[in-house]
């Protein structure tokens, strides 16, 4: 019992870190639970063709999965239908058991390019719906690309980010119904980013001149607190520093956004209501 509790406490601590800083603890520390050696799988292990999805790990096969805070829900990568030829998706130089569509793009079939990221019931393995983010494997981070989930207190709402260094590729907000299946899945990056850019564009912030659209000033949602009723607070940045080596205050801004996201009265969609946007003072180039 003590060993089980130690592992659970370690996994909870490790999985809480993405909600705080947008990175997993395993990005910095490669250790296992106290007093326990990590399980090392053989690198020639291969799922059967009937296996459609594989749990996404924080770092590699030996690290914890991306789980909700109560461990009830997890995130998997794979396919909605099979059979799946996992040998075609094996990372060619991976020292652990990893699968992705990144290192094997030239040999993937059309069906193998139709991958997705899924929510699942950890206890039963049941797939609860597609998250519709552009993640490309069963590792949570590939170089600068990373999948980061944020859960409401009772896991009724989940926000999932697919990041790429300075900006977000995809941000989706999903509601679960009484059967814990995804009933609403909607883009959050577009409406939230547009609202913040409009605020910056009308302000006296130096970034106002570039805050025309998300192509001029790429947007990232760096952190989110979301309640079960859709009330949220998010840190949003506009960051053009990667494209501009001589960047200045007009290429970067930070804002704290508060509001509420509610389900539409009809149909599988949601309404994003922004109540306040607080801009931080301009940041000078280093």
Image (spheres, rainbow, N blue to C red):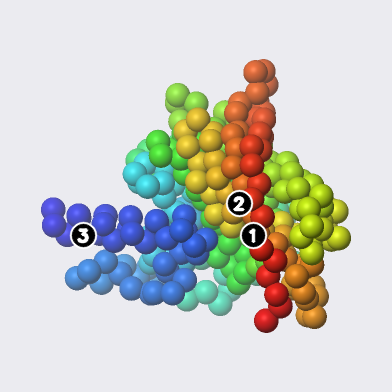
Residue 255: give x, y in percent of width and height.
64, 55
Q: Is residue 74 above or below residue 56?
A: above
Picture residue at 72% right of the left edge, 48% below the top: 196
Residue 132: give x, y in percent of width and height.
64, 44
Tell me whether circle 2 and circle 1 mark residues in contact (CB < 8 Å): yes
How many residues crowd around disc 1 within 10 Å: few (fewer than 14), some, or many (20 or more)? few
Provide the residue designation for mark 2: 256
What's the mark number on residue 6?
3
The reply to whether residue 50 is in sight is: no
Q: Is residue 253 above or below residue 283?
A: above
| 10 on left or right of 102 | left
Q: CA distance from mark 1 to mark 3?
A: 41 Å
Picture residue at 75% right of the left edge, 70% below the top: 249
* Kind of element beneath mark 1: loop
Q: CA distance from mark 2 to mark 3?
A: 36 Å
Provide the residue designation for mark 1: 280
Question: Which one is in front, 274 or 230?
Answer: 274
Picture residue at 42% right of the left edge, 67% below the top: 25
**Sooner in the amino-acid sequence: mark 1 or mark 3:** 3
| 35 on left or right of 285 | left
* Kind of element beneath mark 2: strand
Q: Is residue 232 above or below residue 201?
A: above
């Amino acid at each position: 019992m003590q060993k089980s509790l130690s592992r659970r406490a370690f996994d909870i601590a490790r999985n809480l870190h993405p909600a705080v800083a947008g990175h997993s603890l395993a990005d910095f520390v490669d250790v296992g639970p106290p007093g326990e050696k990590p399980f090392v799988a053989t690198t020639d292990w291969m799922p059967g063709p009937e296996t459609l999805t594989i749990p996404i790990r924080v770092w590699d096969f030996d690290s914890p999965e991306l789980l909700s805070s109560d461990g009830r829900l997890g995130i998997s990568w794979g396919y909605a239908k099979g059979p799946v030829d996992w040998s075609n998706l094996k990372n060619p130089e991976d020292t652990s058991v990893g699968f992705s569509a990144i290192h094997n793009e030239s040999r993937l079939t059309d069906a193998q390019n139709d991958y997705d990221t899924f929510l699942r019931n950890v206890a039963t393995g049941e797939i609860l719906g597609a998250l519709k983010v552009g993640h490309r494997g069963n590792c949570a981070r590939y170089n600068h690309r990373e999948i980061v989930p944020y859960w409401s207190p009772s896991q009724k709402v989940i926000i999932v980010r697919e990041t790429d260094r300075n900006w977000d590729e995809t941000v989706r907000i999903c509601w679960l119904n009484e059967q814990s299946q995804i009933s609403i899945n909607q883009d959050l990056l577009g409406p939230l980013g547009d609202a913040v850019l409009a605020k910056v564009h009308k302000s006296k912030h130096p970034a106002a001149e570039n805050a025309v659209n998300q192509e001029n000033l790429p947007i990232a949602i760096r952190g989110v607190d979301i309640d079960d009723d859709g009330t949220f607070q998010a840190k949003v940045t506009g960051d053009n520093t990667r494209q501009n080596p001589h960047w200045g205050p007009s290429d970067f801004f930070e804002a704290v956004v508060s509001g509420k996201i509610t389900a539409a009265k009809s149909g599988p969609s949601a309404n994003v209501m922004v109540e306040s946007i607080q801009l931080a003072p301009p940041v000078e180039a280093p």
